[in-house]
Amino acid sequence: MTATSALKLAALAALAATACSRFRRGNDEPVGWDTQASGTTVSLRGVHAVSDAVAWASGAGGTVLRTTDGGATWRRVGVPDADSLDFRDVAAVDSLTAYAMSAGEGERGRARIYKTADGGRSWSLVLSDTTRGTFFDAISFWDRNRGVAVSDPVGGRFVVVVTEDGGRTWRRPAATGMPPARPGEAAFAAGGAALTIQPPAHIWFVTGGTPGGRVFRSDDAGRTWVAYDVPQVAPQAASSGLFAVAFKDPQNGVAVGGDYTRPRDGGRGVLVTPNGGVTWLGNGTEAARGYWSGLSAIPGARGGRFVAVGGPGTIYTRNMGEGWSRVDSVAYNGVSFAGPNAGWAVGDSGRVARWKRAAPR
């Protein structure tokens, strides 16, 4: 038996261990969204839940929003004179500190990262990469000092930038540690979830495009990488592949995608891994089929609970992707949870919604 075969058998065994559990909604855990007033009509794609009270969101027209009262009110705290920028992702540290990432061509001055340390009253430009081909897709932070962002390929390899001092300086790990990109391969800045991290230094990002999707993994904060081929979630095209990835812990993860030109149908939509991303298995559950651009694990929840959003609406799993339930049919772009009662989703036309809270016991 080859090493690859052994890994695949181990992955199948791990998934089979949960096969006896069927999906059902717990009486103590309402499932669904409560719409909130965002005060804007722009397309929102980035969202980061910090706590039960605090969340940030971002989107087109230089928009950054913040709530400190659980979403009862959202206030626009965007970067001044940034109307031409599209903030596809936001990474928040707390109620005051956050990073807004602009997705756009570096040669046109649109590949930027801004930081605020005062709740959005002021912003500083901490990174502007004008290299031709640079196009940031997602950003994440392990803590208030250590963060990472990923860009589409430059010179035939994906670009990862890392900060260890709260954004004051950024470095590119040596390109020799990154496997070559395939022709036509790219990441998608769709819902701010093409990149995810786990402590102490694990990183994963997902790709798509005409060659099909892959999962890239680093266990040393981006110094070295391995790229894994995965089952295809949709017919190969420039508009298809994996769009989002999230992990419950360093071993158990989910990746989602599809084809954004077919937002409500096509493909199997969901992949799961029980071994840190070495092997990925497709989930053919009917509820999971479609195009999914956003994904979040639910920290602190029992079992392996994830929420995915996209063109078909929202789907939810309580058992590491073995079973999925369709929650609703309202399209969202991005989703983020800080805990079982602290989750938000964002979408087009300024759409913001909060996950329904469990009733007190």
Image (cartoon, rainbow, N blue to C red):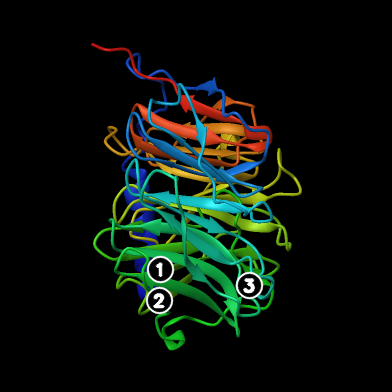
In this picture, residue 179 sits left or right of residue 28: right
Which element type, helix, strand or loop, lies under badge 2?
loop
**Image coords of residue 188 (percent x, y):** 61, 59
Which element type, helix, strand or loop, lies under badge 1?
strand
Per the image, the residue denoted by label 3 is 106
Of callouts 1 and 2, which one flags the residue occurring earlier in the amino acid sequence?
1
Q: Which of the image's four quarters has the C terminus?
A: top left
Q: Which of the image's four quarters has the N terminus?
A: bottom left
**Image coords of residue 92 (percent x, y):** 39, 48
CB-based contact (under 8 Å), mark 1 and mark 3: no
Under mark 3, the amino acid is Gly
Residue closest to the eye, 241 or 174:
174
Residue, x 41% and y 86% (percent of image)?
Answer: 174
**Image coords of residue 18 (percent x, y):** 34, 39
Q: Quadrant of residue 29?
A: top left
345 over 133 or under it: above or below: above
Per the image, the residue denoted by label 2 is 225
CB-based contact (under 8 Å), mark 1 and mark 2: yes
Under mark 1, the amino acid is Arg
Per the image, the residue denoted by label 1 is 217
